[in-house]
Image (cartoon, rainbow, N blue to C red):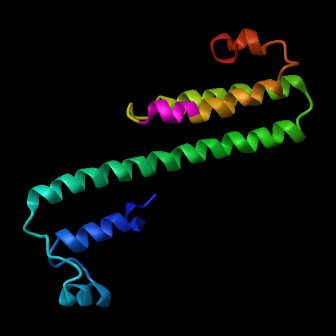
């Protein structure tokens, strides 16, 4: 994910960095007084820059979480429609649980509770698909009980 696509960064540069690349609309905004020149407010710029960094990190981890969720959803689709052998479904479920655990070990602590709730819900909803597999509760007692 590229943070430059977020308009927040461009707006910050426009307001707080004098001489930043500006287009015709921003030049018109400066002339008419619609856009103030805030380049002298260094402390305010630093605080806003910190908030923008946090916003960028939140967007990056939301994107990565969505990638993992997409993999879970794709495998769920396959499990529900194509895989009929119970042990094959168990193998896919074990792979998804491993994917979830590996991903959660890389997530920063400030995003961990929300991401864990989101992915845990989708992983645990797969239990109904694999209820005829004898090894599920024995293999994953802490996760699938």
Percent of width and height locating residue 112: 45, 32
Is residue 112 one of those drawn in magenta? yes
Quadrant of the drawing holding the C terminus: top right
At x 59%, y 47%, the residue is 67
Residue 5 found in image quarter: bottom left
Q: Total of numbered circles in the picture? A: 0
Image quarter of residue 25? bottom left
For the record, the magenta segment spans 111-117
Q: Magenta segment, principal secondary structure?
A: helix
- 70 on left or right of 134: left
Is 8 on the left-hand or right-hand side of 112?
left
Camera-side residue of 109 and 30: 30
From the viewer's perspective, tell me whether residue 126 is left or right of residue 20. Answer: right
Residue visible at 30% across and 70% down?
11
Image coordinates of residue 83 in percent, x first then y, are 88, 35
> Residue 141: where, in percent of width, then height?
68, 10
Whether residue 73 appears in this view of the structure is yes
Of the pair 73 and 14, the residue shown nearer to us: 14
Where is residue 99 shown, x and y percent of the image? 61, 32
Q: Residue furthest left?
A: 40
Quadrant in which residue 144 is drawn? top right
Query: Residue at 72% of width from left, 43% of height from top?
Result: 73
């Amino acid at each position: 994910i590229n943070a430059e696509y977020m308009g927040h960064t461009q707006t910050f540069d426009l307001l707080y960095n004098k001489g930043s690349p500006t287009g015709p609309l921003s030049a018109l905004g400066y002339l008419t007084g619609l856009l103030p020149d805030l380049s002298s407010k260094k402390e305010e710029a630093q605080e806003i820059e910190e908030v923008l960094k946090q916003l960028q990190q939140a967007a990056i981890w939301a994107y990565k979480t969505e990638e993992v969720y997409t993999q879970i959803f794709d495998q769920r689709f396959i499990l529900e429609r194509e895989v009929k052998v119970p042990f094959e479904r168990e193998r896919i479920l074990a792979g998804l649980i491993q994917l979830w655990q590996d991903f959660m070990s890389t997530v920063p602590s400030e995003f961990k509770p929300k991401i864990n709730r989101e992915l845990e819900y989708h992983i645990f909803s797969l239990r109904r698909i694999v209820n005829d597999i004898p090894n599920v509760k024995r293999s994953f007692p802490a996760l699938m009980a």
